[in-house]
Image (cartoon, grey):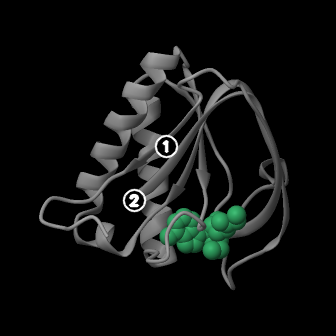
């Protein structure tokens, strides 16, 4: 899994079009979303993650918690983003991983939004620009090599 973490004044998105034949079903309300004072986490779930999705979920949650405590963010925006890797996991696996990360972050006490999966979306982001505002992390299940 590849993550790009951006500490932001806000992140807002608007769904534009389907990017998959069967994207995640969403309500009218989910077609737009915005969070202020948020740690935006753009995530590409990778093929290697398919060997142990649960381990990747726990490692991703641990990394996000670590960065959130360093930048003092208690809101997280989980953003599916298929552009951080050339070895993407299948959509059904990727969606389950991202849904589980969302669930686990809520269990850890964060306010969480997740952008819809399988769509082209317009988005606006205001990066805070401090030294820890732009970070990336790579997560692999044990036994897999980082490519
Ligand atoms: N910017 C717009 C976009 O990325 N759209 C992506 C994601 O929402 C989602 N998606 C599909 N596979 C994956 C994956 N392995 N990891 C994350 N998201 C995925 O499906 C869309 C088309 O690839």
Q: Is residue 21 above or below residue 123?
A: below
Q: Position of residue 134 (x, y in %)?
A: 58, 35
Of the residues tagged 1 and 2, which is closer to the observer? 2
Residue lying at 21% horizontally and 67% vertically, measured from the top left: 145
The answer to whether the residue bearing label 2 lies less than 8 angstroms from the nearest atom of ligand 1 is no
Element assignment for label 2 = loop
In the rendering, which numbered label is found on residue 102? Answer: 1
Do we see residue 25 in this rendering? Answer: no
Q: Answer whether residue 87 is visible to the viewer in this image.
A: yes
Q: Residue furthest top?
A: 72
Percent x, y for residue 144? 19, 67
> In terms of sequence position, does the residue under pointer 1 or pointer 2 come before the other?
2
- The percent position of residue 53, horizontal first and vertical second, equals 29, 61
- Determine the CA span between mark 1 and mark 2: 15 Å
State the residue at coordinates (50%, 24%). 110
For the N terminus, the image quarter is bottom left
- On-image quarter of the C terminus: bottom left
Q: Quadrant of residue 5?
A: top right
Residue at 32% in and 53% down: 139
- Side of 26 relative to 39 (left or right): right
Instruction: Classify the position of ligand 1 by quadrant: top left, top right, bottom left or bottom right.
Output: bottom right
In this view, the residue farthest toward the bottom is 21
Question: Viewer-proximal residue, 127 or 23?
Answer: 127
Q: Which residue appears farthest toward the front when viewing the image? A: 131
Is residue 67 placed above or below 44 in the rendered structure? above
Q: Residue at x 44, y 34 (%)?
A: 105
Instruction: Tell me if 20 is positioned left or right of 73 in this view.
Output: right
Residue at numbered disc 2: 1
């Amino acid at each position: 899994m590849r993550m790009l973490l951006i500490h932001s004044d806000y992140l807002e998105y608007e769904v534009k079009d389907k990017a998959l034949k069967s994207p995640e079903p969403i309500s009218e309300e989910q077609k737009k979303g915005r969070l202020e004072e948020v740690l935006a986490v753009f995530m590409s779930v990778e093929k290697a993650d398919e060997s142990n999705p649960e381990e990747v979920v726990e490692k991703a949650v641990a990394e996000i918690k670590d960065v959130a405590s360093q930048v003092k963010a208690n809101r997280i925006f989980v953003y599916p983003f298929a552009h951080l890797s050339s070895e993407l996991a299948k959509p059904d696996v990727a969606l389950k991983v991202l849904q589980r990360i969302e669930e686990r972050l809520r269990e850890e006490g964060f306010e969480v939004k997740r952008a819809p999966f399988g769509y082209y979306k317009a988005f606006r982001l205001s990066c805070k620009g401090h030294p820890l505002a732009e970070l990336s992390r790579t997560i692999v299940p044990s036994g897999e090599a980082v490519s």
